[in-house]
Image: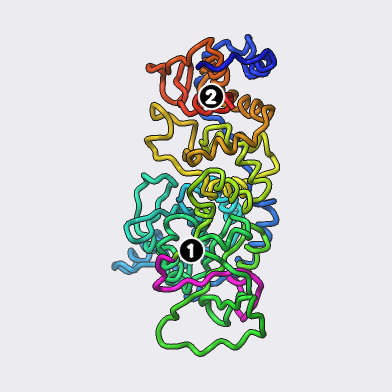
Amino acid sequence: GRPAAPRDGARRRVAELLPAQDERVADPDHHRLGEVAVPIASAFPGLLPLQRALRPVQRYRPPAAPARHTLDEPATAELSAHAETVIPVLRGVHRRAAALRLLMDGSSSMAVWEQMLHDLRQVCERVGAFRDVTVHYLHPHGPDVGVAAAPGPGSPLRPADQLHDPTGHHLTLVISDCAGPLWRDGRMQRLLYRWAADAPLAVVQPLPQRMWGRTLLPAVPGTLVRRQGSYQALDFLPARRRRRPAPAPAPSPGPPRERAVPVLSATPSALGCWARLAAADAGLSLRGAACVVRADHGAEPTTGPQDAPGGGEPTRMVREFEQQASPAARLLAVHLSAVPLALPVIQLVQRAMLPHTGPAELAEVLLSGLVTQLPPDGRASGGQSTGTGPWYDFAPGVRDELLSRLSAGEAALILKHCSLYIERTFGRSARNFPAVAVAMLSGSGREPEADRGAPPGGGRGSAVPAPFARVSERVLRR
């Protein structure tokens, strides 16, 4: 049967979701707004402390400094004219010796850390230690790792080993949560092994340290030891075997089977420790975290954080997530059950409802196993999207389980923010989905069909992706 009509109190609450009469007037220039910028919290508490922590890397010197010369064309022409033969004149080039590569993991769970990459690049460009700072995105490329200039999966790829510089003039920072497909079969670990001995290299792990043990690169605390002389792979002494560091063993013929790769948290102290180890020209030992990688690193049965709760019954999945996640991440998951999981909408709800949280709590939800990424053809009807970034959805039954923990007042406020987002993104004439859902539930109306002739990407009369209507109806039915 048809559900009963809502009571007067429910009608008054729904009326608060409707725009005022004077706000419904269409703005002829509103379609020029395009996408709405959503503020994103940075993973760093401040950029100035991070810049100060990275200053020691200015003293880094590559193991072999190649002679750099450039042709002085005016002097060559002058000397050749007097000598009546071509005599090239070369001039020395004075510039910084080292460069920095920032390698960003292109997996879907890393979309929430784009602001962190932007901040880190900005700080490294201002620290005055590198002649250039380049950004590359890592993607699967057959059996190896590929790099692209953009985060999207459709960008042209080339083998990552083409970036390898055995002369030691390129420092490398890999930004990854170590939970994507590159780490599952060991191809990323093998790449780190090949690069670690030639120049300073580290993995910047944005997840909280309590989650590192459940990733595919489980780093442990200990002591990082920098050998004397030119840069070599760091030695590592785990903290569980705390004792006086033994002298470095004599080099054996052939490369070692294992190498230690520093794993850094997104803090100035951790990045500053790596900078001091890179710049030291004598033996130095500092506290830090690292993981051992091997030349033949293969697929291991290590369980990543996205597999922690496991599949199965939704109640059990949510219960296991609540046992492992932080209180803020648990609350964020409940709030996100009332909206379609497009990245701009997720960030909008997070900033509006839980401003004290950041990308770390959002990453906990995305890697919890409760959320899966939608394929490109299933993100929104009509091929439209709400902005940049991937689309996600909860596992079957999980959204209803989380909605049972959401109060009516919080649900109404979240739907209000969602309606304002639709209005600003797709135009003021777009449908107000909470009101449409209530009309459907009360039997007083039907959901209007999408405008098939609407311009794509927003504007007056444009169609809005269907997930907004479906999720709003489910929330109000609850």
Q: Residue furthest left?
A: 85
Q: Is residue 30 above or below residue 311?
A: above
- How would you rate the neighbour count of disc 1 (Cα within 10 Å): few for under 14, some for 14-19, many for 20 or more? some
Residue where numbered disc 1 is placed: 302
* Depth check, front residue: 340 or 86: 340
Label placed on residue 98: none
Q: Tell me the residue at 65%/52% (across/down).
A: 44
Q: Is residue 31 above or below residue 109?
A: above
- How would you rate the neighbour count of disc 2 (Cα within 10 Å): few for under 14, some for 14-19, many for 20 or more? many
Q: Secondary structure at mark 1?
A: loop
Report x, y in % for residue 456.
41, 24
Q: Amino acid at mark 2?
A: Glu
Report x, y in % for residue 288.
63, 69
Q: Which residues are magenta?
A: 277-300
Q: Residue 206 vs residue 156: left or right?
A: right
Q: Earlier in the sequence, mark 1 or mark 2?
A: 1
* Depth check, front residue: 261 or 394: 394
Q: Is residue 146 visible?
A: yes
Q: Is residue 84 magenta?
A: no
Quadrant placement of the C terminus = top right
Residue where numbered disc 2 is placed: 473
Q: Tell me the residue at 64%/37% (across/down).
A: 405
Query: Residue 449 occupies which quadrant of the picture?
Result: top left
Q: Is residue 100 visible?
A: no
Q: Give the number of callouts.
A: 2
Q: Residue 101 vs residue 283: left or right?
A: left
Q: Amino acid at mark 1?
A: Thr
